[in-house]
Image (spheres, rainbow, N blue to C red):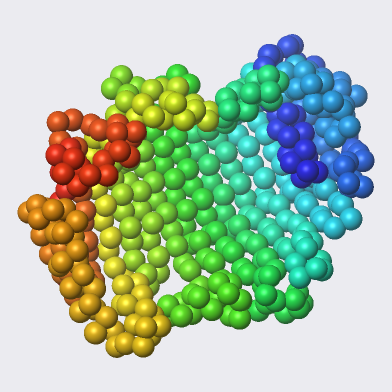
Amino acid sequence: MVLSRCIIAILLAIGVMAQPALADSVNVGELSFAAAKHATLTFSKLVVKDSSLSAADVSRMLDPATPDADKISLAQKLSASAIDIETVRLVGPDSVLNVHDFKLRNVVGGRFSNFTMSGFDGIANSVVNNGAEREDFKTGPLTIENGDMSALLSALRDGQMDAASMRFSALTWTGLEAQLPSPEKKNVGVVTNRTKVVLESVQAQASYQGDVPTNATLQLKGFHFAPPAGSAVGTSLRSFGYEQLDLSLTFKGIYDVAKQTYLVDELLVSGLNTGALGVKGLFAGIPASAMKGTPSPDVLKQGQVASLNLRYVDAGLGEKVLAAVARDQGKSAEVLRKEWISLSNNVLPLMLMGDPVGFKLSQAFSSFLAKPGQLDVSVKPKGGPIGFAELLTLADPAVFLSRIELDASAKAP
């Protein structure tokens, strides 16, 4: 698609596999190219400082009509102390994309010290209800520190995208927003007939041992999903007492190269007036190759679970779900609550063949159902870590309990 080719062209422009002697700056007021599907791609106020390529070669590298192999070859020859583009504009029959204040610094060997853009915005038409409906999207500033795209360039060159990856030490992105048409609503001019998606900020950090990522953190703050009131999704949300979803996510992972273990130190998804689900786990048998690019299924099968802990803290979702299901069944919430508690007390011990752990689990779930507060569940293999493949074969309760230690507890709010 045109947009993806535009992005690849920009990425190629900043990737470097070698560093020839620095030359003069390339300063072009405007470059404009014909793109696929009758679109036009324009670079305004393009400056490549200390460029190792001529202005003609820079133009060829950015031209969508240039064969990909030639673009990659030119990108491998490019080095520059700075690349600035005031605006990248892609205009097609049914879409417009504008990228603002594109800046790169110290581009060397496929790496760069700093990348910023002040944001991008655009519109596009999608086919909904047998007609064109407008989509709007925009973002705020994006900053990437200490980026490395050499693996991506090599993957593009060799046609092996499973090996594609991009490294960076820090990333910050703010103000992402989109308004999308709803399949059930036709009047695009009415804002309430459109789904609004907002992500207030993204922050990520990473560190590496050689080319292996060993520490990673990610924070997604202020994700808001607001479907139209009359849409199927909007109606479903409102049946649970919500007009929109307001979520956030926090992640922290640590990889030990020597031990080949991956620690999920924190994975927390929380929602306003819903609750928070946290996951912590230790996984063994993870080869360093699985941490780079896209790992193959065979590599992932080598992984093992050493421990897994789940924690849910309710902030209103439990009672709302109970009330919604009770309403659908024509019962009071308290009657349904008693039925669920009865099921927990009887089914879990039966499923686990009367093992004491079944009664402990049922007690924890029943206490949580009575007064939704905090629920903790832990899974720990007996006799050492258990492989992912073996875990999937533990269908028999007796075999499962001989290999897995389960625990659960509940706290009232």
User: Which residue is drawn at the image coordinates 16% and 44% (left, top)?
Assistant: 398
Instruction: Residue 345 in the image: state x and y as whole percent.
Output: 15, 67
Residue at point 50%, 75% (across, down):
236
Q: Position of residue 76 (x, y in %)?
A: 72, 18
Location of residue 371 (image quadrant): bottom left
Tell me if residue 286 comes above or below residue 198 in the rendering: above
Q: Nearer the viewer, residue 376 or 404?
A: 404
* Viewer-closest of 390 and 73: 390
Question: Can you say whether 278 is above or below 382 in the image?
Answer: below
Measuring from the top left, give residue 384's x and y in whole percent. Answer: 18, 30
Residue visible at 33% across and 58% down?
A: 277
Query: Which residue is at the far left?
Result: 356
Residue at position x 16%, y 59% from top? 350
Q: Nearer the viewer, residue 199 or 362?
A: 362
One can see residue 382 in this view:
yes
Q: From the viewer's side, name the closer residue of 4 and 168.
A: 4
The answer to whether residue 285 is left or right of residue 168 is left
Task: Check the image and report above or below for 334 versus 115.
Answer: below
**In the image, 337: left or right of 31?**
left
Res. 195 image quadrant: bottom right
The spot of residue 259 in percent (x, y) is 28, 22
Q: Is residue 144 above or below residue 369?
A: above
Quadrant the C terminus occupies: bottom left
Relative horizontal placement of residue 177, taking residue 410 as reference (left or right): right
Looking at the figure, which quarter contains the N terminus? top right
Q: Residue 10: tell me if it is visible.
A: no
- Spot the residue most to the top: 21
